[in-house]
Image (cartoon, rainbow, N blue to C red):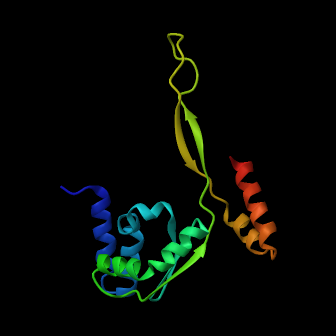
């Protein structure tokens, strides 16, 4: 018996197998944490266009290191999907998504003792309207300051 996630993955891939570019794109997106390994904490997939993968990198120093390793990364991606389909990697600096902690089970239980506080991380995302508005701001410093302010407001 297969886990549900694996079953859904097989169904998705079965319907896109006749469209190879879409199949490779889906396989890359679904398996990205496995393909990138520990580097997934340093980067994410921004977009996939034809045979090019654009990776968002959370740190400029890491962007330089990953650029130097781009041939190795591209080979790893193509090896995983089973064909030398992707031909180019590009890197761009992106802000790492902010995570806030939400406390669960805080308070006093029925016998008068305090519940153990469990912190659960919650990803803070900006709405589509907020992202669109930020993209329209020409000054990059102002855009970054306003984005950081929005994230702080939501946390």
Q: Residue at x 36, y 69 (%)?
A: 35
**Image quadrant where residue 97 sits:** bottom right
Extreme residue toward the top, this view = 111
Residue 67 placement (x, y as % from top left): 50, 79
The residue shown at (26%, 55%) is: 3
Depth check: 25 or 37 in front?
A: 37
Residue at 70 percent of width and 67 percent of height: 131
Q: How many labels does the image show?
A: 0
Decide: is 96 above or below 65. above
Is 25 above or below relative to 132? below
The single residue placed furthest to the left in the displayed view is 1
Of 3 and 50, the residue lying toward us:
50
Please report the residue visible at 27 percent of the width from the left and 63 percent of the height from the top.
7
Relative placement, left or right, of 76 versus 127 is left
Return the x and y of residue 124 as percentages of the image width and height.
62, 53
Give x and y (percent) for residue 110: 51, 13
Q: Is residue 45 left or right of residue 36?
A: right
Q: Quadrant of residue 132?
A: bottom right
Q: Where is residue 126 in the image (x, y as percent from the top left)?
A: 67, 60
Question: Left or right of 43: which side holds 5?
Answer: left
Q: Is residue 78 above or below residue 113?
A: below
Instruction: Locate the N terminus by quadrant.
Output: bottom left
């Amino acid at each position: 018996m297969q886990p549900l996630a694996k079953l859904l993955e097989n169904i998705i891939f079965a319907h896109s197998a006749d469209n190879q570019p879409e199949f490779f794109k889906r396989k890359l997106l679904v398996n990205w944490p496995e393909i990138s390994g520990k580097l997934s904490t340093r980067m994410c997939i921004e977009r996939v266009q034809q045979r090019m993968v654009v990776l968002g990198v959370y740190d400029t120093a890491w962007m330089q290191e990953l650029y130097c390793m781009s041939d190795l990364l591209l080979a790893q991606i193509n090896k995983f999907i089973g064909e030398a389909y992707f031909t180019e990697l590009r890197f761009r600096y992106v802000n790492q998504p902010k995570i806030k902690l939400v406390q669960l089970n805080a308070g006093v239980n029925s016998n008068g003792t305090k519940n153990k506080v469990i912190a659960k991380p919650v990803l803070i995302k900006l709405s589509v309207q907020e992202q669109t508005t930020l993209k329209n701001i020409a000054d990059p410093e102002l855009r970054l300051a306003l984005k950081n302010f929005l994230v702080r407001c939501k946390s």
